[in-house]
Amino acid sequence: MNLKDKLISAATRFDERNSRRRGWNPYALAQYFAAIDGICNAVDNGMSVESAIARFTNDRFCDVLLKAAGVGRRSV
C-alpha cells in the first residue's frame, strides 16, 4: 500500500466512525480526500510526510493520518 492508499483508508474509517455522531458533516469525506491530495502533492514536492499532514489537517484527524502513515503523533 502506498501513502495515498493508507491515508484514504484511514480517512474512510475516521468518517465512518464520526458519521454516527450528532452534527456529522455529510461532506466531510470529500474534504478529507481533498486534504489527502494536498498532502500527497506536498510530499511529492519534497515536504516531509509529518509536515505535510500537519499543514493540511488538524486535531484528531491529523493524529489519525499520522498514525496511518506510520509517523506517530504530532511533534510539529
Image (tube, rainbow, N blue to C red):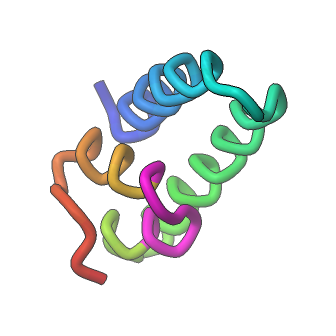
Looking at the picture, does residue 71 appear above or below residue 23? below
Which residue of the protein is positioned furthest toward the front in this rendering?
22
Residue 36 in percent (x, y) is at 57, 47
Q: Residue at x 41, y 30 (%)?
A: 10
Q: Residue at x 71, y 28 (%)?
A: 22
Query: Which is nearer the eye, 3 or 61?
Result: 61
Q: Residue at x 24, y 46 (%)?
A: 67
Q: Quadrant of the N terminus?
A: top left
Looking at the picture, does residue 12 appear above or below residue 53? above
Q: Which residues are magenta?
A: 52-61
Q: Main secondary structure of the magenta part?
A: helix
Residue 41 in percent (x, y) is at 57, 60
Residue 48 covered by magenta stretch: no
Query: Which is nearer the eye, 29 or 50?
Result: 29
Q: On the image, which quarter does residue 9 sit in? A: top left
Q: Quadrant of the C terminus?
A: bottom left
Q: Is residue 50 left or right of residue 32?
A: left
Which residue of the protein is positioned furthest toward the right in this rendering?
27
Looking at the picture, does residue 36 appear above or below residue 2? below
Q: Residue at x 33, y 54 (%)?
A: 63
